[in-house]
Amino acid sequence: MDIEIGSNLYRNSNGTIEVEGVPQIEVARHPSTGALLVNFALFDSNGRLLAKVVDSTMMFNERRAYELTRTNQSVAMKETDSGKTLFHFEVKAAAVVSLSRGEFHTMKGRLLHVSPTEWKIDKQQRSGLTQDAGGGAVSIG
């Protein structure tokens, strides 16, 4: 599976996205329906788990502060009060999934920002990169 994060393309991944060395996101397609499946762990700035998504379904949602919207082709999560998008994944082609925008904390408490042009964690950023994951995880940060 190919994964786009901002304007960066990671080819031949296994669907896992490691953020600062920790598997935080996993994307896959349902074998029979083709629906997009997202697994995601949301942390606060202290590394405490706030919400968890498993197979595009909210499994844990502290204080009901987050909402999930999904179709067969996209999955998005946002803060209920502010409306801020935490992530937006969509299927762009048969084997390409895109994380086009989002903003959330890593397990280490640093803020990851994804825009259509780049991903950025503190002073680290990537834009326009194409990389082969060699059948493994995509690693950012």
Image (cartoon, grey):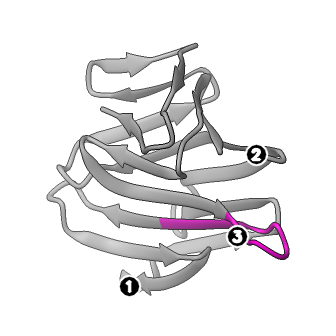
Q: CA distance from mark 1 to mark 3?
A: 18 Å
Work out whether mark 2 precedes mark 3 in sequence or the reverse, and give the earlier one: 3
Q: Position of residue 5 (x, y in %)?
A: 56, 34
Which residue type carries mark 2? Ala
Local packing at callout 2 (Cα closer than 10 Å; few below 14, some 14-19, many 20+) is few
Q: Is residue 37 magenta?
A: yes
Of the numbered discs 1 and 2, the one sitting upstream in the chain is 1
User: In the image, is residue 132 above or below residue 17?
Assistant: above
Q: Are marks 1 and 3 in contact (CB under 8 Å)?
A: no
Q: In which quadrant of the rendered view does residue 137 lie? A: top left
> Does residue 120 belong to the magenta stretch?
no
What segment carries the magenta color?
29-39
Which residue is labeled 1 in the image? 63
Residue 87 vs residue 100: left or right?
left
- Element type at marker 1? helix
Q: Earlier in the sequence, mark 1 or mark 3?
A: 1
SS category of the residue bearing label 3: strand
Q: CA distance from mark 1 to mark 2?
A: 35 Å
* Residue sitting at x 51%, y 42%: 135
For mark 3, what is the residue? 69
